[in-house]
Structures are given as C-alpha cells and as structure tokens.
Image (tube, grey):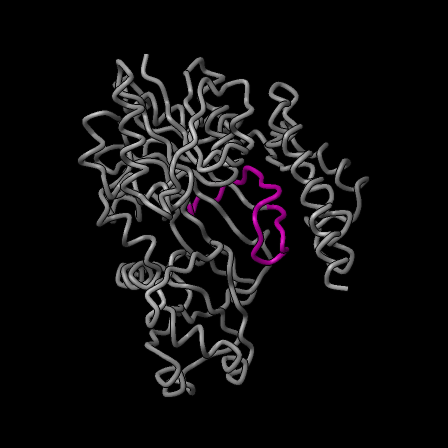
Amino acid sequence: MNKAIVFNIFFNGLGVIRALGKNNIEVIALDKTNQNVGKYSKYTTNFYKVTDPNLNDEKFINELIKIGEGLSEKPVLFPTNDVWSIAISKYKKKLEKYFLTYNPDYFIIEKLINKKKFYSIMTKENILVPQTYEIENYEHLKKIKNELKFPIIMKPNSRMEVNRRSKETKIYNSNRMIEINKFEDFKEYKELIENYDFLIQQKIEGLSNNMYTIGVYADKNSDVRAVFSGRKVRGFPVDIGDCFAGESFWVEELVEKSKEIIKKISYTGIAEVEFKYNDLDKKYYLIEINPRTWSWVGITPETGVNLPLIAYKDLIGEKIPDYIEMDKRKKVLWTRSIEDKLNCKKNHNNLDNKDFLKGEREWKNSLNEYDKIVYADLDPDDIKPGNFWKRELKKSKVKNIIKKIIRR
C-alpha cells in the first residue's frame, strides 16, 4: 500500500496525519525539528528530521529522495506550509520518479506566493481584491502620496524577502502586517521600504472572524472534485491572527468563485482560497490562495469531505466522486482549545463581538452550539500531541517571565 509523507507537522500537518491515519494509511512524518506535535500522534508510523528547505532546499529534496528510494510503492506527498510546498513544485520533475504529488508546476505556484503578481492576475480576471499600489522605493511612494486611501496595510511581497543591498534573506511570519493610518506613519518604516519588497494595500475592515476559507482538491485537469467552506471564528491577534477556532460555514458565492479561479490558474491539488468580508462595503475580497493544506484542515473529515484522503485516493488511482461538497447540515467547530480558551479569558474583555467570548464559562457554553467539536490539541483519541503541546506552552510561559525579569 502507498504510504503518505507529511511534512512540517505542526497542527496543520497533524490534521493531515489524523485524516489519513484514521483510514489505515501509514504516515511518515518529516520536520526540521525533533520536537513538533505531529511526531507524537499515534497515527505517525515513522519520523525523520530533515533539512529546513528555507536553508537548503536542494539538500532537503535529496534527503526526501533517499526516503523514497527505500519504499516499494510511491508514497503520496503532503507539504503543509508554503516553503515546503514551493520546494516540491520547484523539484517536481526530479521527485516524480519516487513520489506521487498533486502539487502544481512551479510557475503556477510562483504566481500565488508573489503577491504582486497574484493581485495583478486576479485584477485582470475581474476578481475583487484589495486595491494594491505598486511602489519601487520610498521616493516612489512619496510621488503617489495623493493617490493613497487610508487606512493602508503594508506587508512583505512574499514570505522570504532578499535585502536589495546586502542580499541577505529575511524570513517573515506569514501574518506580518503593518497598519498605516496617515502618510507620516511611513517614515518609521522607510528602511524596510528601501531595502525590501513591500506591498502597500487597501485595508479590508473587520476582525479575523470576517475571514472565510474555501478548501478544495483539484485533479490533474484543474477540475475541483471536493469542496469545504468555513469561517475563522477566533484568532490571535484578533484582527489578523492565527486561527484558534474555525467552523464549517457554507457560502455558495465563494465556493463558485473559488472553483472558477482554480480552473483559470490551472491549479492542481489541495489549496485554501481565502476571502475577507469588508464591513464597510459588505463585499467579499479575495486575500490569497495558499498552495497547500491550511492550519485547520483537520476539520474537513468531520464535515464529510476529507480532503487529504480524497487527494490520496485520486493519486494512487482509486475512484473518487466526480464532485463532493461538505455536509451543510452539520455544524462543526475546530479548535486549538488550550489557546482558544485562554485567548477568550485574557484578550477579549474590550471587544463587542459575539464570536470573541469573554471567559472560560462562555467558551464552554459555546461548544453546545455545534454538532461536533474537533480538538486539534486535546483529541481524546490521540492525546499525546496535546500533552506535548501543554508542556511546550508551559516552557514558553516560563521563558517569557524570564525575559520580563531580565528587561527590568
């Protein structure tokens, strides 16, 4: 039987491991560190520490091939963040001798990760995206000063940016975003603008619960064969933060738009198409397409559309449905419960929003609204990853206390 190889095994990868392992598929897990939640899942058959593709993607690929050479049947590859996904597409021809991969060709994935290219393409296709301003440097920014409509956000054009002067690479957190409310605010970031490729863009008003995810699996013909639709309920920080809780939530308009986009760009494989609802004009804006599984993909099996399993079956030649949508009647919540509960207790006191609960009691009561709860961390059927994560959070808390003491 074909094994699956899942790499970068934080909660995203853990969700994929469980989605496959619960269906009796052997899973090999890879990561750049020996310590990550997916390593401890009972569904992880083997674990290998490998080179971080950020540091040396060719070395990582050679290590991956060495694993593939030792297997009798081609395993299916499941990259779970941008850097690992980019490496697979970049070396796709070389890898296909040893592996089955749904990743698109590199020239397609490059259009998605380069935000300037992405927004330009989507604008030409008449897809509603945030207004984006092309700037070359700080002097150029001053020249278009009168064209700017505030508030504006400033973010790196891609996660890995090369300094124009020193040629050193800077790796940005995917959520890095700076809000600019007046032109004078740009002065503080002049050095960044001069040295790195930053995107200047319209801010779409609303908190993180205005973010909508359409998860798809598209076959080799770029036909969408399976669809999940959901909404981020809570994140941290509350406006642009990582997802701590997400729910199944069907939006027909966004599903149809996503299928149209996937076909137009000739995308293949699993992707997250992300939209944000603008509180001001009441419209949905396309924010990005993540060429991989996303942080809360672990929700999909409980909604009747197990995207990792569907992708796996299609690649090994098993018949899959011509088209399947999630069960719209079933209300499912995915949660990183330890942090979600703590977030509600500590960070929502000044927020007037029904999703941003205040306190542990409200959090617990809210769970009754759902037909099914997917605990990404404290899954009672796979508890070791959660126990590991609790220990890691305690370590992090101690480190933060020590830092505060040192600052004093």
Along the line of sight, which residue is nearer the eye, 345 or 156?
Answer: 156
> Quadrant of the image for the N terminus?
top left
Q: Residue at x 23, y 46 (%)?
A: 106
Along the line of sight, which residue is nearer the eye, 222 or 53?
Answer: 53
What is the magenta range? 233-254
In the rendered image, residue 350, in percent from the top left (x then y), is placed at: 76, 60
110 vs 325: above or below: below
Q: Is residue 237 magenta?
A: yes
Q: Residue at x 46, y 40 (%)?
A: 294
12 vs 163: above or below: above
| Image quadrant where residue 364 sits | top right
| Image quadrant where residue 280 sits | bottom right
56 displayed left or right of 341: left
209 vs 331: above or below: below
In the rendered image, residue 68, in percent from the top left (x then y), is placed at: 28, 23
113 displayed left or right of 399: left
| Image quadrant where residue 392 sits | top right
Along the line of sight, which residue is nearer the eye, 291 or 224?
Answer: 291
In the rendered image, residue 247, in percent from the top left (x then y), is placed at: 58, 39
Q: Is residue 331 magenta?
A: no
> Quadrant of the image for the C terminus?
bottom right
Q: Residue at x 38, y 63 (%)?
A: 157
In the rendered image, residue 394, in percent from the top left (x then y), is placed at: 71, 39
Q: Residue at x 37, y 60 (%)?
A: 169
